[in-house]
Image: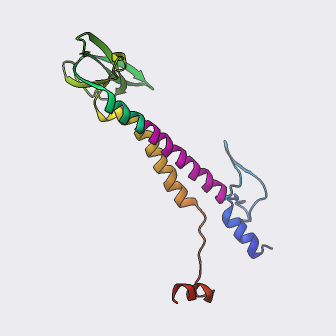
Amino acid sequence: MYSHHDAQYLSEVFVPTRPSDGWPMAGPRCYGDITMLPVNRRVLAWFLGLAACLSFLMALAFGLHTWHFRQTAIRALGQVIELRKEMDEGDVTYRAVFRFSDAAGKEHPVTSSMNMKPAAHRVGDRVTVLYPPGNPEAARIDSFWELWFETAIPAVIGVAFAVWFLLTAPRRAVDFRANPSHSAKENP
């Protein structure tokens, strides 16, 4: 039979059960194409916490890079001259091609780094363009998605991992009634 220690272990580890008798199995169980292995909740929580931290660090790095780009970039007015149609996983998306003049007056056509559905711009639209000094080919349209998309994705993933971490992290409950020394410290 199972002891109290076994019950605590089983509450921290996912063990598939046999449909016939409901008792935990000793090894992995195969459900079609998926094999389910025991997973320690503490290990899963640490993994999710680490993944959340790494995602937030990536978002911070991308955010600092974008912030620096916005602070040092030269602003210019441009115009959308073409919408390039592209196939993206079976969907039609559009990538803006815009033209602008740099500080020296030389015109540069540049293709947007983002393809969108529906198109974010129309041919003939005037847009604000940001480009690094000395590198007008790296110009970007001054819009949220053009500039902050690469920051937003790891930030959203980090939030998802953090919420998952908070939901799966093992909890330790303290019963202050069972241990008088805790309640004495709380209420001197």
Instruction: Residue 146: tell me if it is visible.
Output: no
Instruction: Residue 135: tell me if it is visible.
Output: yes
Compared with 4, 28 (above or below) is above
Q: Position of residue 49 (x, y in %)?
A: 57, 53
Compared with 28, 139 (above or below) is above
Question: In screen coordinates, is 93 left or right of 34?
Answer: left
Residue found farthest to the top: 106
Name which residue lies at 76% across and 59% down: 25
Per the image, is 64 magenta? no
Give the quadrant of residue 174: bottom right
**Quadrant in which the N terminus is drawn:** bottom right
Name which residue lies at 74% across and 65% down: 23
Colouring convention used in this rendered image of the protein: rainbow
Question: In screen coordinates, is 106 left or right of 148?
Answer: left
Name which residue lies at 72% across and 71% down: 7
Give the quadrant of residue 19: bottom right
Q: How many marks?
A: 0
Q: Position of residue 135 (x, y in %)?
A: 36, 17
Residue found farthest to the right: 1
Q: Position of residue 176 (x, y in %)?
A: 58, 84
Q: Position of residue 163 (x, y in %)?
A: 49, 55
* The one of 38 and 61 positioned closer to us in this rendering: 61
Most common secondary structure along the magenta stretch: helix
Question: In screen coordinates, is 118 left or right of 37?
Answer: left
Compared with 148, 177 (above or below) is below
* The one of 81 and 15 positioned closer to us in this rendering: 81
The residue segment tinted magenta is 41-62
